[in-house]
Image (cartoon, coloured by chain):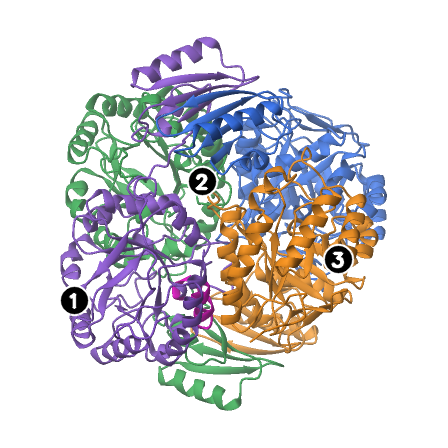
Chain colours: A green, B purple, C blue, D orange
Amino acid sequence: MIVVLKPGAPQGVVDALVDQLRGWNLETQTIVGRENVVIGLIGDTSSLCDDRVQELSPFIDRVLRVKKRFKRASREFHPERTVVSVPTAGGTVEIGGEGPLVCMAGPCSVESEAMILETAHRVKAAGARILRGGAYKPRTSPYDFQGHGESALELLAAARTATGLAIVTEVMDTSDLEAIAEVADIVQVGARNMQNYSLLKKVGQQPKPVLLKRAFSATIDEWLLAAEYILAAGNPNVILCERGIRTFDRQYTRNTLDLAAVPVLRSITHLPVIVDPSHGTGLSQFVESCSKAAVAIGADGLMIEVHPDPARALSDGPQCLTPDEFDAAMANLAPIALAVGRPLQTAAPAAARP
Amino acid sequence: MIVVLKPGAPQGVVDALVDQLRGWNLETQTIVGRENVVIGLIGDTSSLCDDRVQELSPFIDRVLRVKKRFKRASREFHPERTVVSVPTAGGTVEIGGEGPLVCMAGPCSVESEAMILETAHRVKAAGARILRGGAYKPRTSPYDFQGHGESALELLAAARTATGLAIVTEVMDTSDLEAIAEVADIVQVGARNMQNYSLLKKVGQQPKPVLLKRAFSATIDEWLLAAEYILAAGNPNVILCERGIRTFDRQYTRNTLDLAAVPVLRSITHLPVIVDPSHGTGLSQFVESCSKAAVAIGADGLMIEVHPDPARALSDGPQCLTPDEFDAAMANLAPIALAVGRPLQTAAPAAARP
Amino acid sequence: MIVVLKPGAPQGVVDALVDQLRGWNLETQTIVGRENVVIGLIGDTSSLCDDRVQELSPFIDRVLRVKKRFKRASREFHPERTVVSVPTAGGTVEIGGEGPLVCMAGPCSVESEAMILETAHRVKAAGARILRGGAYKPRTSPYDFQGHGESALELLAAARTATGLAIVTEVMDTSDLEAIAEVADIVQVGARNMQNYSLLKKVGQQPKPVLLKRAFSATIDEWLLAAEYILAAGNPNVILCERGIRTFDRQYTRNTLDLAAVPVLRSITHLPVIVDPSHGTGLSQFVESCSKAAVAIGADGLMIEVHPDPARALSDGPQCLTPDEFDAAMANLAPIALAVGRPLQTAAPAAARP
Amino acid sequence: MIVVLKPGAPQGVVDALVDQLRGWNLETQTIVGRENVVIGLIGDTSSLCDDRVQELSPFIDRVLRVKKRFKRASREFHPERTVVSVPTAGGTVEIGGEGPLVCMAGPCSVESEAMILETAHRVKAAGARILRGGAYKPRTSPYDFQGHGESALELLAAARTATGLAIVTEVMDTSDLEAIAEVADIVQVGARNMQNYSLLKKVGQQPKPVLLKRAFSATIDEWLLAAEYILAAGNPNVILCERGIRTFDRQYTRNTLDLAAVPVLRSITHLPVIVDPSHGTGLSQFVESCSKAAVAIGADGLMIEVHPDPARALSDGPQCLTPDEFDAAMANLAPIALAVGRPLQTAAPAAARP
């Protein structure tokens, strides 16, 4: 940590600061510049809050942190890439690392047994390994459909039995976690709850992998610190999901998909990173092209909304692909995936893949 | 609701759409422009999701909502301003309407009995009516101080007994709500939980007033829809608190305080609106000037962080005023408050107020 | 155009409005909803400013524009895609449409004859068809290197002669335009001047194609309206260049590359769209992956900064590729370009391309 | 300047870096932390670009600038506040420092002799000292009214003669500057041209004071560096004007007025700062409340749009006050101005001022 003093800070202030910092069991080294004095702190500053240092004196101009605040999520701490393994009836699905890509697909909400089963069979046939579907839905308005809750969980379980797909579904309340984790192979924390720290601690204390979506306006550091809550609570299996951030231009797309976050994350964290182009753009017509870009830029997988009849979807219809559109998108993705050396995983016995 | 069709939409499509919309018990009226056809929907569209209409046909260009989605929070539904009454040993505190302003003040976190009592006495003497102090703290890093929890609640109760101030403190988890609501006169939902809908429903089902902070990147509509969750659950006493939004420039202030949101909100909602300049700027040196502006622009009150020794604060030190600085700020605010015709409430018997 | 009145607007107000709008030679049609009256305007509203209508009465809640304000830039007006042709000694380069992709590459600034010639030969060998290089540089600080001006133009001309590459370079001042357009095959308007309307009008009045970069915080509509200035002044050859927008998170990348803007633009405008991943991220380590994504998502070309010795670059060093890195990037891009059916154009006689 | 190396940078790299930096005539001092090495640079780094240092080695993690890049605009360089003096027939108007506040008012565009004269007389009577009015208008669409140009300049000159008010009007093109500076007492550079560096250099070379509006998404540092261009070119009389920034929420206001920028600027620059609530909100109904807040927070003045008939304004009607509304706003501002100790300047002989 580096403490920059304001021009003209008296020597007495510098000396007092140094004394105080040493009292905190830190070594210090002082650089006297032409106008500013700078104090470097040597030692374990990870538990030291920048604010506390800043407040030591009004002569402090800035406190600069040299080390990242996230540790377990960092590649420095954990250089090899995390691969999250999800056992399914159709074999283990692996997410992350340098292996084949994974596609999660399904409806925004689980609406009925027929629709979830139909969707599950179709997305499996097209190459998805994981079925998404919401039982509990965070909706902006209290008057919107809030999800079918527990009964939807049962339908997801039935779809798993019928298809062998793994299940990912969202938890919104700590009191629902146990029931959800019984059915889900991956527990999702949505964008709106990314900084719901009570929830993060709880999902960190249970054994199922966690899919952590980025909040609308979370910086990458805040997102990784949210992951750190889960890791620090004991659960090493966190999958990051970029789903679009909020910017000044929302006329043509619901969010701005931050695809460059994928290579940025791959450079600083070992956790797998997937992309959700459905929420990222909010419009089905852009899902295929954004999926291609996500694969090209290095994502470990995709999460795509598919609904048998988007016009009648109870939520998020405009961003859902039909099963036919999903078939086409998966077919068109395949050559890009091959071109980057990471073919799409499928449930079928791994035949002739280059 | 207005449905704008794309140029060139065939007559058959228009007719089919009109049939479908009428099947939903809505009247329609069609405007044939030079290039676009527009269909107006007449009837109760409040429970109709824009998305569902959008998905009816690929020839639909846009769906425009004429009415707001929030209802109980709107002035159209409830023209007279809500005044939230908080009974205290020192008399009822009223927040909202056109009456005197209310100041809430206190430390970010409750750290010890001595510090909370000292702060409470000082902020009361300076004119605050409500003591703020965190028992459960949402912190960006899992390694930061997370609040003293239940023992801090006891200290807040002691401070209330000692001073007669009302208490506002934050709830982060539905499972803590009961314990918090026993001590708190106002329950706070923080910015990070503004769209934690499980929590909103629960605070809406209990009787204590709720202070709802704006999320970092919440639009005004999203914020009012979050309030709508609380109102719809049965609790009419919601206080909105602007605390700064996230923008591209974060070098000099932690957030961008959106002061113009105050008159905007006063024009569309009846709920009281207060401003938190401490979080809004993140720096104590800007708290007084921003407080003056908040009063001048029409806020119903202020929430200000005060700590007896900011340099040793366990959280948010740089944005805390010392008690002496708070005394000065309150004294300097008074003439602005008088100039806008809304003097500051104090606990003292309302002496010579003009 | 649609005029939404506030609830409770008196009939007299509605009648007066209708009279006034008809006085502007517009037909009107009125929809009487349960709470709101809506007036539809029929006729040519393209020259009508929303604001003027809004101001007609305080009972107007909102004015909704049905048609886009840009016309010449829109696909509705001009359905077939524009292909910008640039004649060079090595054959015509075509940008846009559905044909092969174009790569523009070169240094941020032209620094010396040796460096620009070396760079030109290397980027040509790797497959670029157009050489970029700044003679006049917009720099945030007046104390930064401002470009070598006219002498740099001469060096660009020499590089063109030596390699047969076309030249793209930036104009910042209307008074420099003539000299720049003499050397440049494509005239660039930078992000900071995207709304310098005097400059847009002038580049619209000269015959060279114009590369129009998106401003830091320009919406897509504002960007297309800036293009409309050029088109309306008589120049049909406008190339749009996405180069990153400004958002709340600038810690790891200089800007947020808005790749989804590419398919959005392709759906509403006929103009070619290229992507600049160098400015888009600001860091050379992310240029290749973002280039791949740009190609996968449907861009018509790329603009990439290449410098023989980035560590000594007079500007933008951290985002420049070395010629070796550029070679590698182009080689790695090729399979993605093939996978989307749009191979990279090269100067070499079009050999065995599928 | 401080150079932070990545963990694990070899000693040879550190030594080579130190040699190179010393070769640039800088002293260095090295701090060896537990994981990172940090090199402090001592000497004149103001002309050193962070990027050049960053590129010296891939082992450099970050380069941290200790000193601000703006110098002439900084309070460190120029501690006393700049007061810009504008001579008028009605006495000198002073902007900045700690003295009385200045109000600039008038229409967005100069539309006719009658309207500009009427407006001038009315705003003068209400207390404005400076008349604003556009002759050249930057408009988002090429099809919008672009201002009456030279003939409007003549009308402004006539209004000055008739009223004794000073004139502020915008320059968009370096080729118009001479004609504008002949009429204008203050030359305005608009938000869209804040980083039009050719224009900044030219207005810096002429003697009239310059009003520099903040660009939609300019950081405070970028804004002060734009001012630095003008100062460095020789013109010390720069007035900063906050006019709202672009954020994610634009539903209720056209921009987000960044009022906290006022105290931030007062802490780091000596230049006067005024606020434009008309553009800042885009709606006349919020202009008075935002003006009060601007005065309360410490602005040196205001710029307010006033039009005799906003419904017929050729531009920006919805944000214009009528002369009667302006009278009321000025009357309501007066007590706030008194409360902060900075009464509004008026042209009238300074009568009963407290």
**Which chain does the numbered disc 1 sit on?**
B
Q: Which residue is mark 2?
A: A255
Does B202 sit left or right of C62 as displayed? Answer: left
Start-end of magenta stretch:
B278-293
Say which residue label 1 marks.
Answer: B150
Total of numbered circles in the picture?
3
Q: CA distance from mark 1 to mark 3?
A: 61 Å
Measured along the vertical axis of the image, is residue C50 above or below residue B81? Answer: above
Label 2 crowding class (10 Å Cα cut-off): few <14, some 14-19, many 20+? Answer: many
Amino acid residing under circle 2: Asn
Callout 3: chain: C
Question: Majority secondary structure of the magenta segment?
Answer: helix
Q: Give the side of residue C52 with respect to residue A161, left or right.
A: right
Q: Position of residue D118 (x, y in %)?
A: 69, 49
Is residue B292 one of those drawn in magenta? yes
The answer to whether marks 2 and 3 sit on the same chain is no
Q: CA distance from mark 2 to mark 3?
A: 36 Å
The amino acid type found where label 3 is placed reads Gln
Q: Pointer 3: residues within 10 angstroms few (<14), some, or many (20+)?
A: some
On residue B193, the disc is none
C198 sits left or right of D325 in the view:
right
